[in-house]
Amino acid sequence: QVQLVESGGGLVQAGGSLRLSCAASGSIFKINSMGWYRQAPGKQRDLVAVITSGDSRNYANFVKGRFTISRDNAKNAVYLQMDSLVPEDTAVYSCNADVYSTTGFRAEYWGQGTQVTVSS
């Protein structure tokens, strides 16, 4: 069993910054890609950013130049530094991990989500 726990969400004014963290724990042998997704009320869930085990990164066009994804493999953690936030960034942000467990089982896991609210 693998658990993902996010932290760092909250309320911020437009132009401000937040840093989200997500730590994975449990029966982990190896984590492949880790990523952040977001879902605003009434909208579909969108990919925000993803980072591979080889440190390759991809971003959604709507966050390029404003958000930075990083990971700490020793801590099984992924981070999302969000700068120059705008009200349209308001959403529930969830982390995702593609994990090989110690039993050889590969699966995708999700955190519970953390609310980010950007006021104008």
Image (tube, grey):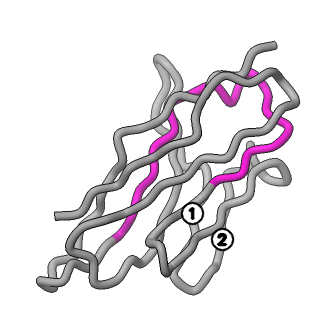
Q: What residue is drawn where x is 74% and y is 24%?
A: 12
Q: Position of residue 44 (x, y in %)?
A: 46, 32
How many labels were placed on the picture? Answer: 2
Q: Are marks 2 and 1 in contact (CB under 8 Å)?
A: yes
Please identify the quarter of the rendering in which residue 116 is found: top right
Is residue 14 rendered to the left or right of residue 115? right
Residues drawn in magenta? 80-98
- The furthest residue to the left: 103
Residue at the (31%, 65%) spot, across then down: 25
Residue under circle 2?
Answer: 57
Which amino acid is tagged 1?
A: Val
Check residue 96 for magenta coloring. yes
Q: Amino acid at mark 2?
A: Arg
Q: Which residue is mark 1?
A: 50
Within 10 Å of disc 2 (Cα), the crowding (few <14, some 14-19, many 20+) is some
Where is residue 46? Give x, y as percent: 53, 42
